[in-house]
Amino acid sequence: MRAVVFERYGEPAEVRDVADPVPSLDGVVVRVEATGLCRSDWHGWMGHDPDVVLPHVPGHELAGVLEAVGDRVARWRPGDRVTVPFVCACGSCGACAEGDQQVCERQTQPGFTHWGSFAQYVALEHADVNLVAVPEEMSFVTAAGLGCRFATAFRAVVAQGRVAPGQWVAVHGCGGVGLSAVMIAAASGARVVAVDISPDALDLARKFGAAECVDASTAGDVAEAVRELSGGGAHVSLDALGSPATCAASVGGLRRRGRHIQVGLLPSAAGDPVVPMSRVIALELELLGSHGMPAHAYAPMLELVRAGAVRPDLLVTSTIPLSEAPAALAAMGAAPGAGVTVVEPQR
Ligand SMILES: [Zn+2]
Ligand SMILES: [Zn+2]
């Protein structure tokens, strides 16, 4: 099969022929029809993720058709249309027993712990625990984003954020996951303040339901701007980018008893951000992480998509063949840009 391979961190990846994957007993091989390009792929390519072993194939936001199924897989057949959370759970550890597959103790992540979906085929583990059926009416390009940015945003806003209608939600960073969060929060009846340094990203945020926008490149004190626009601070605030500055601004923009949700990955190379814990005490803030979403929790999100209340399809601004993926991967660091690029490996 053809796959995007890199031999060294931060040096150009290339498309080459590699061996086809075979399914493990509990696993499957998916013919990849669409795979989203995500900032996490760029972090992996740069060497920021300790799970990545060279040479490596990135890609974790995928949808496609089952090509081969392991002997112990009960629920799936070749030809099924599927997607998968970026965290693939083991199904048998303590976290999995609690229904918290998103923090599985023995998780695998395509594109990180093993070769990913920037390829014509990808192997996935523990298929009965992790696969999600893609409805007939949903395109693979739309479905590709569900397992990372959209599901992560959904869990962050709805499950971790516990957003209620009429509340203020601040979203710091309006890339793929941030714009997804804007959509989902607006669909939940919240009033959204979107924050970014890109006017294009803020235009999209407004289009997707943000009531207010803050241009962080000109706003000066971003946290103060959010507090002013939201009448005293957000009830829920997401750092959807992942940086010391956006994390601090998110915590700083909360009202009393507000909830900060850390969604954007904070690469260890940059060190842990400084969090104003005195503010956390004085205002009784909650600080929560959000790490994907388990396959069993997809149904309400898929129903929201089916009903047209959220439009993950509108987040995709370009589709490219596999041959253009190496350059697009490299460009992700310098200019994440507005909107989402999806790779179609069969093209
Ligand atoms: Zn992702
Ligand atoms: Zn587990």
Image (tube, grey):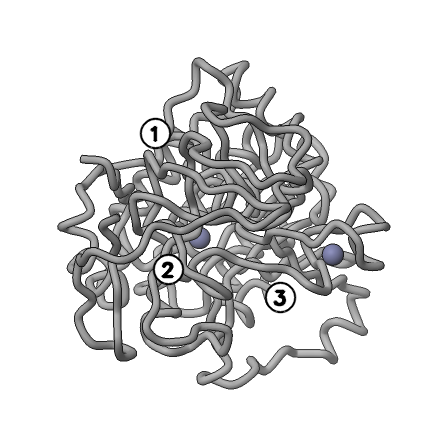
Q: Kindly tell me whether residue 195 is visible in this rendering.
A: no
Q: Cα distance, mark 3 to mark 2?
A: 22 Å
Is 309 placed above or below 223 here? above
* Residue under numbered circle 1: 314
- Please tell me how crowded label 3 is: few (under 14), some (14-19), or many (20+) other residues with Cα within 10 Å: many
Q: Are marks 3 and 2 in contact (CB under 8 Å)?
A: no
Left or right: residue 96 versus residue 51 is right
Element on which disc 3 rests: helix
> What residue appears at the point 78 percent right and 66 percent down from the top-left corner?
283
Is 312 placed above or below 149 here? above
Does label 1 or label 3 sit earlier along the sequence? 3
Residue 38 in percent (x, y) is at: 37, 54
Residue 122 in percent (x, y) is at: 41, 48
Does label 3 or label 2 sit earlier along the sequence? 2
Number of marks in the rendered image:
3
**Which mark is on residue 39?**
2
